[in-house]
Amino acid sequence: MLLTSGCFGLGGTGGQGRWPSNVPAVRNASSREQISLAGGGMVLFFRHTGPFQSAFSGLVEDLTSGGWQILDAKGTLHSQSLAGCGPDCDELRFYAVTRRVGYRSETLLRVYAPDEIRPPLVLSSPCVPVTLSLEELDASSRYAPIYDVDLDRDGRLDVYVPRLEGEQVVWDAHVLRGGCGHHVGTFVRLPADPHTTEMGPEGLVPLTVAEPTVDEDGRERKVPVTYRFNGTVYERPEPS
C-alpha cells in the first residue's frame, strides 16, 4: 500500500506541519498525509474512493489548473504515473503514482526540494528500447511495466519491467532517458518503494527487496535485502 498511518483530514495540519502552499488542492481525497524529508523534499499521500483512473485524471487536472506542468504520464494496469514540474522546472519537480488498492485508490506525490534535483547520471550500460514481451508472460496476468520510481532523482520516471528467467518472473530496473533505458539491475521480487530513501553515493537510490528464504526449521519467510548501486549495476550484499 502507498498510504501510511497517521492520516489527517483535508482541513487539518497533522503532526508534520501545514499542507505545503505550492501543492494545489486535490479533490475527492478522503484523507491525506505529509512526510517531510531531511533534504527539504516531501512525500504526500492521498486516499480516494472510486476508480483509480478517475483519481488519476482528477489529480492531473488539479495539478495543471494549479500551474504545474505534466512532462510525462504513463499507465499500466492498476497503476498510473506522471512526472512534472512547477512554473520553474529548475526549482520544483514532482512525480506521482496512483494505484488501485482493493475498492479504493491511493496516490503518492513526491515533491523535490530544489537541491535534491540531480542532473541525469551518466551510465555505462547502453541505452536500449524498453519492451515487454507478452508472448513470454501471460498476457492476461497482472504483469506489466511499473513506472513508479525515480532512481536517479532527476525528476523523470524510471521503470521496472517483468520478464521470465527460466520459470521465475524477475524484474529488470531501467533508468529512462527519453525513449530508451539503461538496465541497472535485476531483482527476484519488485523492490519496495524508495520514495523517502536518500541518494546512494554512486548516484542511484538503494533498493530493498523482500526475498524468499527457508529458515533452519524449513519454514518459508521473506527477508529484506538492500541492493546498492556500485556505479554500474545494483549489487546484492554478500551474506553475513
Image (cartoon, rainbow, N blue to C red):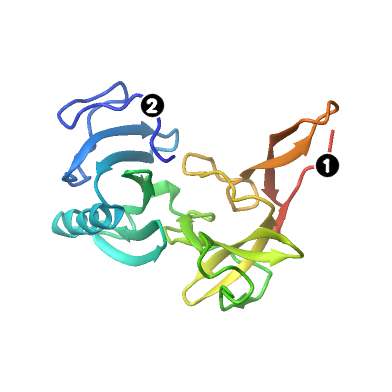
Q: What is the x, y in percent for residue 200?
A: 61, 45
Residue identifier under label 2? 5
Distance Cα–Cα, label 1 vs label 2: 33 Å
Task: State the residue in front, 134 or 2.
Answer: 134
Going 35% across and 65% down the picture, which residue do you hit? 73
Q: Quadrant of residue 60?
A: bottom left
* Badge count: 2
Q: What is the x, y in percent for residue 59?
A: 23, 53
Task: State the residue in front, 88 or 132.
Answer: 132
At numbered mark 1, what does the secondary structure look like: helix, strand or loop?
loop
First-in-chain label (1 vs 2) = 2
Going 59% across and 75% down the picture, which residue do you hit? 133
* Amino acid type, label 2: Ser
Asked whether, in this view, residue 152 is left or right of residue 39, the answer is right
- Numbered badge on residue 17: none
Task: State the residue in front, 198 or 192.
Answer: 192
* 47 up-or-down from 190: above or below: above
* Amino acid type, label 1: Glu
Residue 112 seen in this snapshot: no
Quarter in which the N terminus is drawn: top left
Local crowd size for mark 2, using a 10 Å CA cut-off: few (<14), some (14–19), many (≥20): few
Toward the top, the furthest residue is 15
* 167 up-or-down from 221: above or below: below
- Residues at badges 1 and 2 in contact (C-beta under 8 Å)? no
